[in-house]
Image (tube, rainbow, N blue to C red):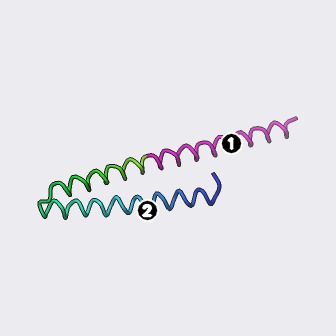
């Protein structure tokens, strides 16, 4: 993953984390106002944000693992060339 793409994903993650926090606060306000339907709808948006964060984190981990293994593979190839 290139630097620009990684930065965009990081911004996406930060934005969704912020939205999730705001949704938590909005849900508490709706519950305090005893607006059950609104609290429920906000809860659904909160769950969706949580799911999206989980997807982003999984993609980040996968990209990091791929980069690690590629780096290890290159190091191994370089060591083989030096030994030859």
Q: Which mark is residue 9?
A: none
Viewer-side residue, 36 vs 24: 36
Q: Is residue 29 above or below residue 73?
A: below
Residue 65: quadrant of the picture: top right
Q: Is residue 27 above or below residue 54?
A: below
Magenta part of the protein: which range? 55-84
Viewer-side residue, 40 vs 61: 40
**First in residue order: circle 2 vs circle 1:** 2
Image coordinates for residue 9, horizontal then vertical, percent: 53, 56
Residue shown at 26%/56% (left/top)?
Answer: 42
42 inside magenta stretch: no
Viewer-side residue, 11 vs 68: 11
Image coordinates for residue 32, horizontal then vertical, percent: 13, 63
Image coordinates for residue 8, horizontal then vertical, percent: 55, 60
Residue shown at 85%/36% (left/top)?
Answer: 83
Residue identifier under label 1 = 70
Indicate left or right for 65 with 77 as reference. left
Residue identifier under label 2 = 15
Viewer-side residue, 77 vs 3: 3
Q: Are marks 2 and 1 in contact (CB under 8 Å)?
A: no
> Alpha-carbon distance for marks 2 and 1?
30 Å
Q: Please tell me how crowded label 1 is: few (under 14), some (14-19), or many (20+) other residues with Cα within 10 Å.
A: few
């Amino acid at each position: 993953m290139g630097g620009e793409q990684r930065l965009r994903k990081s911004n996406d993650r930060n934005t969704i984390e912020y939205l999730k926090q705001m949704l938590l606060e909005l849900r508490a306000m709706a519950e305090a106002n005893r607006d059950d339907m609104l609290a429920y709808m906000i809860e659904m948006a909160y769950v969706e944000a949580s799911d999206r964060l989980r997807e982003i984190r999984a993609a980040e981990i996968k990209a990091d693992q791929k980069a690690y293994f590629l780096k290890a593979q290159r190091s191994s190839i370089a060591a083989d060339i030096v030994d030859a």
